[in-house]
Image: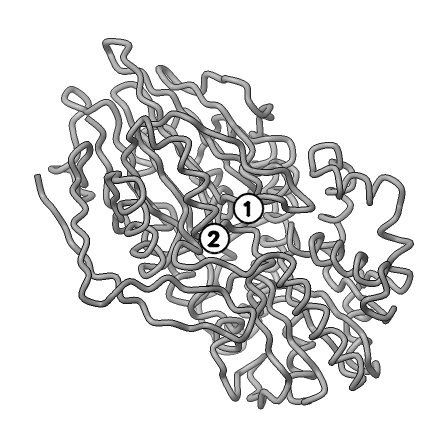
Amino acid sequence: MDQWARSFNAPRWDSGPAASTRHDVNNEMVVQLELREFTLLSQNSTSKSSDENRSVLEVTLHGAAQEVTGSCYLLETANARVLIDCGMFQGSERLERKNKLPPEILNKPLDAVLLTHGHLDHCGRLPLLIRAGYTGPIYATEGTSEIAELVLRDAARIAEDDARRENEKRKRNRLKLIKPLLRDHDVTGVVALFETVEYDKNLDVAEGISARFVEAGHILGSSCIQLKVHDRTNKSRIVIFSGDIGHWNDPIVKDPARIEKADLVFMESTYGDRTRPSLDQTLSEFESILNLTIQRNGKIFIPTFAVGRAQEILYHLASLMRTQKVPQVPVYLDSPMAIDATNLYSRHRKDLDERYEKMTLNEQLERDLATFTTCETAEESKALNSLDGPCIILAGAGMCDAGRILHHLQHGLNDSDNTLIVVGYQARGSLGRELIEGAKQVKILGETIHVRATVANLEGFSAHADQADLLKWLQPMVASKPAIVLTHGESHSIDQLAYEIKRNFDLVVSKPKANETVNLE
């Protein structure tokens, strides 16, 4: 059996007193990770098993392989083909050029699609599947199906607007017109195929395959998916797709569910190389940054993911203002999608943590944020640029690569009184990543902007599990000795988590490349 080795020497990029702790192993330490229980096959017709000789199952990674976005896994058995997630690549232009459907997905009929949650990097290519003719079920929790519709319609609107503007230029230059990547009527096709599933219920999704959706603790409706796959002799194997795992004691969503048995685990590793500061430590720094900026009458810009992060930041702002740790200043939610998502969270309050349920049920949030205003229109958003501080502006997109946050940063980054607080993951190639890595000037909407504002990176707000939480999530499965496939992470994060899994649990670990196939005998 082939072996592979890798040294774990990723560089540090800590960002201040409350930065996460990166776990970098000695440069000379090399860990042998043996693929004893499963093999990696390159993605081609000669290496993959024929239907007659197929192993119990094969899973091909069509995204999130040594990168964070684009989650998409094709599981195949002798009798069934199931797709788990069909997400969009995000970040740099190079990544976004990968937003197409691999022919391997389409060369035979699919039996079902299973969706872990509604973030764009997990559902964003579903409309392409509909455009290609898929008419089967898309299984998801109720919360996920509603969030996915919200996210996809917003993405389609942006794609259609971008294509319209680009085509106006192309017409003037007599160039070939382009088509938008996503279209709203394809999203309607996706929504029509959603079949709602309940948590913790077994569901037959294809011949020989049953699925169980359990709480992932990431956002509303998020799931880890447990598949039981039967072979011709009726022997079963359990395969886990983690989706995005949250952390424990989150005030908005429930804790991740305990999973005790698995043969093969596809596990996210976004923050596999670090331990984040505690929530208390993060809130203390958040409070300090807010107060310092308010004292100098500055504006505070918080780029937020519309689903999950916006609701969490509003919750914490309300708590800080209720306890008078931060003065009441105007708070603007400048994101129509975040406004809709916040309303959606309120409707699903019974599916969330009891602390958030209580706050939304008795309208405590509205009372605590007495100065809270939503900005529905573009005119309302633009008017914020002419306001004097202090104020707090939450706007999308969360990676600062699109949306209304761009206009606020274009007008506000060059003012040393202002502060940008980054509260989520920033992919390679994104404007947000440039800013947290210390860029002195950036390009925004074609204009060079000098960065004079304070830039703070608070990773403690992330909805992704850190290294300690990932190991905590995996620990109940260790007794069953599953093989681990690390995905949804940059290479250094995967390497560090692989080392810790091997050191703590002595499990087989693999990090496939894009389009490689995991074959479970």
Within the image, what quadrant is residue 490 found in? Answer: bottom left
Judged from this view, the residue extending furthest toward the left is 1
Give the Cα distance between marks 1 and 2: 8 Å
Label 2 neighbour load within 10 Å: few <14, some 14-19, many 20+: many
State which quadrant residue 352 falls in.
top right
Relative height, residue 54 to residue 39 (above, below): above
Which badge, 1 or 2, is on the more N-terminal residue? 1
Q: In the rendering, at what x and y percent does residue 396 appear? A: 65, 63
Is 53 above or below relative to 421?
above
Rendered view: 361 above or below 209: below
- The residue under the point 74% across, 57% down is 316
Residue at point 53% right, 35% down? Answer: 223
Mark 1 = which residue? 247
Asked whether the beta carbons under mark 1 and mark 2 sit within 8 Å of each other, the answer is yes
Q: Position of residue 420 (x, y in %)?
A: 64, 76
Q: Is residue 65 left or right of residue 268?
A: left
